[in-house]
Image: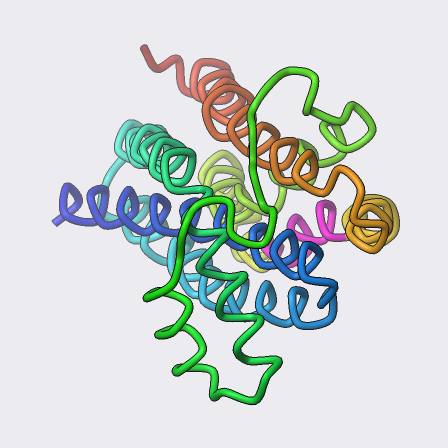
Amino acid sequence: MVVLFISLISVFFFVFVLLDLTSHLPRLSGSSLGLNGLGFAFQTMANTIKRIFLVIIPPALGFIAVYGDPVDVFTAVLSAHAAASVSFFVVFLSRRKLASLFSGAILRYSEGDSLLLSFRKGLAGAKPFQNGVDIRFSLRAIRSDILLPAIWIFFFYTGSGFLVNILAMITHEYSAIILQLTGALNALGTFVLAFFLDPRISRVYENGDGAESVFVTLFSAQMINVLLVSPAFYLFIALLFFGLS
């Protein structure tokens, strides 16, 4: 049963990261169309769906913590990050088509179509470079003023479900309190997002100049977090407190 939950967590986290990367595209598409409000609304829809997968990870990991051991817990966490690495390839390869899909859906919704019909028509007409969205990856496209804050935000927002279970496992006597801190850990990221990062991103989208670089930077920040920062942190905690190898 523990092995099953380890597999489920890997799938949940893969889908979450996939949706998180995709959720940045509606604002880019909306900006290219001059429909920033609808772009933000479509991003909110994507964020709502992805949050479903985020909130089911902590109880699933909690099951492993109760019926397994620390090795199982860290195996689940690191396996989830390994599985999520596939999502970066998926979004990277389909980024232009996804941007075109959202561009078409946003445009048709603005013209009065229903939400479902807008996506159906957008999917049917999605073509690369539609509406001038062309996402090219390069080091020059990464914005230094966005990268580090984004890594901080993604670390706490993405990893809050993992962190609370690991902290509860380390300090059993306070586990009942620590397990209620998911929102608090999440807030460490959302506070920086609300008061520092999002205003800068919104200004770029409003101006419409270099909007593609925002997506490239956020994509890169999440990749650095999921593939490097978070796994290194969890491995350090595992070795420090449990001597795992």
- Span colored in magenta: 181-190
Colour mapping used in the image: rainbow
Which residue is located at x 67 percent, y 61 percent?
Answer: 33
Indicate the position of residue 242 as horizontal and vertical percent values. 41, 20
Q: Nearer the viewer, residue 227 or 205?
A: 205
Q: Nearer the viewer, residue 129 or 101?
A: 129
Q: Evaluate whether residue 62 shows in this view.
A: yes
| Quarter of the C terminus within the rendering | top left
Which residue is located at x 30 percent, y 49 percent?
Answer: 66
Q: Evaluate whether residue 77 shows in this view.
A: no
Tell me if residue 186 is in the magenta stretch. Answer: yes
Residue 5 vs 218, above or below: the answer is: below
Residue 135 vs 108, above or below: the answer is: above
Which residue is located at x 54 percent, y 61 percent?
Answer: 103
125 vs 172, left or right, is left
Indicate the position of residue 185 as horizontal and vertical percent values. 66, 48
Indicate the position of residue 46 as horizontal and vertical percent values. 50, 64
Magenta stretch prevailing secondary structure: helix
Residue 91 vs 185, above or below: the answer is: above
Q: Nearer the viewer, residue 89 or 1?
A: 89
Total numbered labels: 0
Tell me if residue 135 is in the magenta stretch. Answer: no
Q: Nearer the viewer, residue 47 or 187?
A: 47
Residue 44 location, quadrant: bottom right
Indicate the position of residue 27 as horizontal and vertical percent values. 65, 57
Which residue is located at x 50 percent, y 22 percent?
Answer: 237
226 vs 145, left or right, is left
13 vs 2, left or right, is right
